[in-house]
Amino acid sequence: MTPNDREQKVKSLIDKLCLTRDLKRSEWTELIRERTPASAEYLFERARAVRIRCYGHDIYIRGLIEFTNYCRNDCYYCGIRRSNSNAVRYRLTKEDILACCEEGYRLGFRTFVLQGGEDGWFTDERLCDIVSEIRAHFPDCAITLSVGERSYDSYKKLYDAGADRYLLRHETYDAEHYGRLHPASLSASHRQKCLRDLKKIGYQVGTGFMVGSPYQTPENLADDMLFLSRLNPQMVGIGPFIPHHETPFAHMPAGTAELTLFMLGLIRLLLPRVLLPATTALGTIAEDGREKGILAGANVVMPNLSPAQVREKYLLYDNKLCTGDEAAESLNSLKTRMEKIGYHIAVSRGDSLNI
Ligand code: SAH
């Protein structure tokens, strides 16, 4: 095939995706492997049109509260892994967390995302107590949890305490690839079981994966897309892998903004009504990553609401942004940046149309 033939083929696969939302594994692989700058532009135009049809020019915001960086797990890519003895550990109190929500509410946030490592200190009892207090104080807000793998019972208790949504990236669908990113105590199948449990309980679920994680192939990404299609989550978070200097992957190359943007566009076409954040990792790897993410089909941003003194301790990867437009206090400058590209930030819970 000539380069021109290849480009035509990629464009025809994008058309097919747009029309049918159903590609075979080999088609996903080809689409990802053979992409070009021109086919990416073609994709982004279509992804934007779909996004605008579903969500207009609204951008939903979520206030991210990183409430503990203690973690029992040892994921090879993550800066807060258990084996990183140089990480300075912290845990916020219930009062700290409520103060973050208070400040967030004042700024216009109507969704709070409580994210943390898998910290045994936060038993069901303690976490439920925090969730129910937030629920009582902020009845018009959505509460999202992102605290990793727990039992069905634990997820159910948290849901009954008032949590509405749960973010748990599947990281990579393929069991063998998963095994190269995690120690043997963790498995792709258990992670996927957690996602099914969360859905069964009634949570609005977010999943996702890293782009350009070590050893990732176009076939792995194809499997991720097929998994997303089957799970049909309300939200999909993806961002480039970025190395952290105190992990086994310190010297692995980072993922690119280019492939991350392409995957964002594909996800928008596959799941038109999905909530799709332009993530912090994308903003870290490219100066205008957030804007480009929105222009590739994303419709959510998640500024950091954690107390300033703990922000740099939640270091999942090197140079992770936590100031400037990343910080919830700078909402005005984020607003201006988004308005420059024709989009505006909505003060609302920002529920998915896909419920
Ligand atoms: N303990 C929670 C939260 C994990 S941190 C959980 O298990 O879900 C949130 C996400 O950050 C992870 O799911 C992972 O996809 C991403 N992440 C971690 N380390 C990263 C790195 N080095 N580069 C890019 N993203 C990373």
Image (cartoon, grey):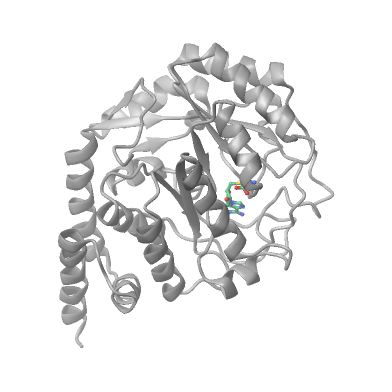
Residue at image point 40% right, 20% down? 332
Q: Nearer the viewer, residue 253 or 132?
A: 132
96 sits to left or right of 230: right
Q: Tell me: residue 265, above or below residue 142.
A: below
Residue 114 visible (yes or no):
no
Question: Where residue 30 sits in the image (x, y, percent)?
Answer: 31, 77
Residue at image point 47% right, 53% down? 208
Residue at image point 71% right, 25% down? 309
Q: Tell me: residue 237, above or below residue 145.
A: below
Q: Nearer the viewer, residue 334 or 187?
A: 187
Position of the C terminus, as image quadrant, is top left
How many labels were placed on the picture? 0
Question: Where residue 323 sits in the image (x, y, percent)?
Answer: 56, 30
Question: Where residue 316 sits in the image (x, y, percent)?
Answer: 64, 47
- Which residue lies most toward the right here? 85
Q: Nearer the viewer, residue 126 or 167?
A: 126
283 sits to left or right of 60: right
Residue at image point 59% right, 75% down? 176
Position of the N terminus, as image quadrant, is bottom left
Q: Tell me: residue 6, above or below residue 73.
A: below
341 sits to left or right of 126: left
Residue 281 visible (yes or no):
yes
Q: Tell me: residue 63, above or below residue 200.
A: above
Q: Quadrant of residue 314?
A: top right
Q: Nearer the viewer, residue 164 or 112?
A: 164
Question: Where residue 268 sits in the image (x, y, percent)?
Answer: 29, 51
